Image (cartoon, rainbow, N blue to C red):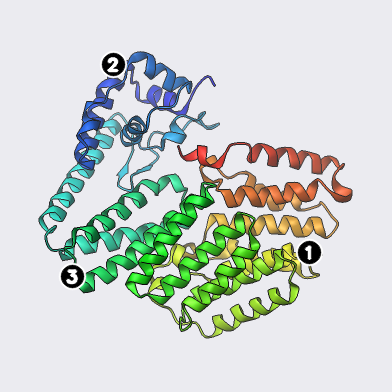
Amino acid sequence: MTGTLLRVLLRQRSWNYPTFRARYERAARELAEIDGNPALAALSVSESTYERWCAGAVSPQPDARLVLEHLLGYSAAELLAPPPAAEPHPAKPRPTRGLIHSSAADPGAADEHDMGRTASMAAQRALRWAMTTESQQVGPETMAHVEEEVHRIAAAYPQVPLSAILDDLVEIQDTIFRILESGGAKPSQARNLHLLAAITSGMLAKASHDLGDPASAMRQARAAFVCADQADHAPARGWVRGLQSLISYWAGRPQDASHYALSGGAAAPQTTGTVRIWLASLQARAAAVLGDAEGMRAATRAGAGARERVEVDDLDAIGGLLTFPRVRELYYSAEAEVLLPGSTPTAEQHAAEAVEAYEAVDRSEWAYGDEAGARTNLALARIAGGRLDGVADALRPVLDLTAAQRSAGIVISAQRVHHALSSGPHRTAGAARELRAEIEAFASAPTRALFR
């Protein structure tokens, strides 16, 4: 690798090594103040290390990566990767730790960026003071902050790369656990905090799953279920069981996926929110992989019946990762049909309807990972239908996803298409060979490495 996005950004800002070092050291001191970690304040960078970072020859240590992200407003994975075909405009806003936006559209842009970081540092410092002041007895401002962060991240999760929210998610989980461990919460607050802990741990279970680490995902999910149980919140218990079903399904354990989906229904028998539809859809998908056509159809009917009786609950009100809109139900239903051995005559039609639904859906219900799954299902249905025309068109938006968007589930979905193109009468076709090569390149980078 001869160059990185980091080198491009420094060239755009006319930062030589001495300038970069001075700004890096200042950013380290700012981050130490924000995070309450004095060790960060002592970080610096030698000229040889600076050159190796710019060339992409070495990966910075974790603390150094945090400082780089704080300084430049891009994730470390992006900074150390080759620059995009079109050089990034320095004015493009990039979130850092959910708070800071980088901008350098004009000669005063560096100052604007610095002011943004300074204002963010002041906000973090003020919030930390407020939370410390309320530490003996959890006050309303602390609770409001925790709730707002959990709701914000849950809504953003399906729509942004994991690298954009992971730090904030880990931080808010740690904050909630520290408040619970302090013993300063009132009983009513403790119940709400346990629910928020269940949600954050569940989202971190999804994060580990997206990073291709089902073992860590299950550990987070078990913690999430304990928290949901402590909150005595039936919909949250069902939601966590749904996460465990999801993790098992993508880890190639459909029997476990079926078990957890059924267990979720038992854990939340009176739930009227969309989690019941999700659990039924998870059950249908697992049954399809197991070759149980009748079980798949029964679960699909159960989900449709639950949709007719649905009443929005507090999880649905948060939205994002915590709700199961109709468009997502269409995607799951089509996937079950496509994956059922032998497929069904309506598989391609339903897969196309799911893709069309994602193209037209309201932004609040859109999820790039689910749309990618819907598109790979359409590609699979077309291959199963005996024709290659339209397969590349269905898959193109998936293959165009950035590296930071290639979660484990998306890569597995693309590999299913690769497998389908490698067998049957299509395997020697030129179009099939070309598409297989593209999929191999798409899936070549280990998912977890994208976020280090």
Task: Mark 3 vs mark 1: give the one in front.
Answer: 3
Task: Kindly identify which numbered label has been placed on residue 186.
Answer: 3
Query: How far is the residue under mark 1 from the one under mark 2?
Result: 63 Å
- Which mark is nearer the camera, 1 or 2? 1
Q: Amino acid at mark 3?
A: Lys
Nearer to us: label 3 or label 2: 3
The three-letter amino acid code for the residue at tag 1 is Pro
- Residue at the top extreme of this rendering: 48
* Residue 356 visible (yes or no): no
Q: Name the image quarter holding residue 235.
A: bottom left
Q: Which mark is residue 370?
A: none
Relative to 151, residue 404 above or below: above
> Which residue is disc 2 drawn over?
18
Left or right, residue 32 beside residue 405: left
Kindly indicate whether the residue at mark 2 contacts the one at mark 1 (C-beta within 8 angstroms).
no
Which of disc 2 and disc 1 is earlier in sequence? Answer: 2
